[in-house]
């Protein structure tokens, strides 16, 4: 199997006339505490989680259920571990709801994220989704008609424009068992929505859905604003019975893991993003059983693998500001 050629790209530099592209490396707390499957959660405090992530090398953490949603309360703890907020999930309901209601629902998180200097809110559509239902097989995922897709894309665009104007952009998370899951669904959705709606590109979810992880970058790189570097265990995915087993069943079986521990070629993925001058966050987000996959060990493995790749592809990894 041929691997992607390594492309090292540079911008302005005082010595050579060029400087490397810059990026930051973050992680999601889902390796420590799973919000959908609380039984897949390590018995650690927020401070322990932040300490372990910092020890591994990360400078950013996405929010989770054990985070106080108050910047004044959280900021001293983040500073203690040289960590910043690099995003966080919002359970959207706009598919079947109204824009005005979504504005009310997201306002508190938006204010918190603005006060925390977060780059974006991760918008995940949960209306009609079966991603959190243990007894709902994967093949029961929701599907939209052409008219429904057009209406949804229009509403999401309007909502994204409002969020951007309010000073906190949203980044749309395509997701297994949700309304926008497959590469084809994502293509249609992105083509029918406006530029204000940027994309969170999740490598693991796209691979799980059977999509081409490099072609998605080629098609939508102009609107990718955030990247989840989730690896997959293809053997687990291939062994699933999608007529009987759910997304949560797949998580429990170990479908996801950190970069360097699965089957995705992150050298090719990061290289392709670098070729389009992507300079957002790379966030490790891999829900696993913390007993089988100890979070600190996996965070260290994921950080080293990801850092090695981004540096090889010409990035300079930015540290926490002193």
Image: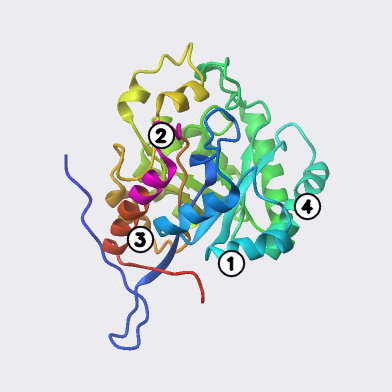
* Residue under label 2: 256
Choose mark 2 or mark 3, whichever is in front: 2
Q: Earlier in the sequence, mark 2 or mark 4?
A: 4
Mark 2 secondary-structure assignment: strand
Choose mark 1 or mark 3, whichever is in front: 1
Rendered view: 309 above or below 185: below
Q: Position of residue 12 (x, y in %)?
A: 37, 81
Choose mark 2 or mark 4, whichever is in front: 2
Q: Residue at coordinates 69% horizontally, 39% vertically from top-left?
A: 92
The colour scheme used to paint the residues is: rainbow
Q: Quadrant of residue 151?
A: top right
Rendered view: 282 above or below 29: below
Q: Which residues are magenta?
A: 289-301
Mark 3 secondary-structure assignment: helix
Q: Earlier in the sequence, mark 1 or mark 4?
A: 1
Choose mark 4 or mark 3, whichever is in front: 4
Q: Are marks 1 and 3 in contact (CB under 8 Å)?
A: no
Mark 1 secondary-structure assignment: helix
* Residue under label 4: 107
Q: Crowding at label 1, few (<14), some or many (≥20) Cα neighbours within 10 Å?
A: few
Does residue 110 appear left or right of residue 321 in this picture? right
> Is residue 74 or residue 319 the one in the foreground?
74
Q: Position of residue 102 (x, y in %)?
A: 77, 43
* Residue under label 3: 274
Q: Position of residue 318 (x, y in %)?
A: 43, 69
Choose mark 1 or mark 2, whichever is in front: 1
Q: Quadrant of residue 236?
A: top left
* Residue under label 1: 79
Q: Marks 4 and 3, Cα distance to the nearest angstrom? A: 33 Å
């Amino acid at each position: 199997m041929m691997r992607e050629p390594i492309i090292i790209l540079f911008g302005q530099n005082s010595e050579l006339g060029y400087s490397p592209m810059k990026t930051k490396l973050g992680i999601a707390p889902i390796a420590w505490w799973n919000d959908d499957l609380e039984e897949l959660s390590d018995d650690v405090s927020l401070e322990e989680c932040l300490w372990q992530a910092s020890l591994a090398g990360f400078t950013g953490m996405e929010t989770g259920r054990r985070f106080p949603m108050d910047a004044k309360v959280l900021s001293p703890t983040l500073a203690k571990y040289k960590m910043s907020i690099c995003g966080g999930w919002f359970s959207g309901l706009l598919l079947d709801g109204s824009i005005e209601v979504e504005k009310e629902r997201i306002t508190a998180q938006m204010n918190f994220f603005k006060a925390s200097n977060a780059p974006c809110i991760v918008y995940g559509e949960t209306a009609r989704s079966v991603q959190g239902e243990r007894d709902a097989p994967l093949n029961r995922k929701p599907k939209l008609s052409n008219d429904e897709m057009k209406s949804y894309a229009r509403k999401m665009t309007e909502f994204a424009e409002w969020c951007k104007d309010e000073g906190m952009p949203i980044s749309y998370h395509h997701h297994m068992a949700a309304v926008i899951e497959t590469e084809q669904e994502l293509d249609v959705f992105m083509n029918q929505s406006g530029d204000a709606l940027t994309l969170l590109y999740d490598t693991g979810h796209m691979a799980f859905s059977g999509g081409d992880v490099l072609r998605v970058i080629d098609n939508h790189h102009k609107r990718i604003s955030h990247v989840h570097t989730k690896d997959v265990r293809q053997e687990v995915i291939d062994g699933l019975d999608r007529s009987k087993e759910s997304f949560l069943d797949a998580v429990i079986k170990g479908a996801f893991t950190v970069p360097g521990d699965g089957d995705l070629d992150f050298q090719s993925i990061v290289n392709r993003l670098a070729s389009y001058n992507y300079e957002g966050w790379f966030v490790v987000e891999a829900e696993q059983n913390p007993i089988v996959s100890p979070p600190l060990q996996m965070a260290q493995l994921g950080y080293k693998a990801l850092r090695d790749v981004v540096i090889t592809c010409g990035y300079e990894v930015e540290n926490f500001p002193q």
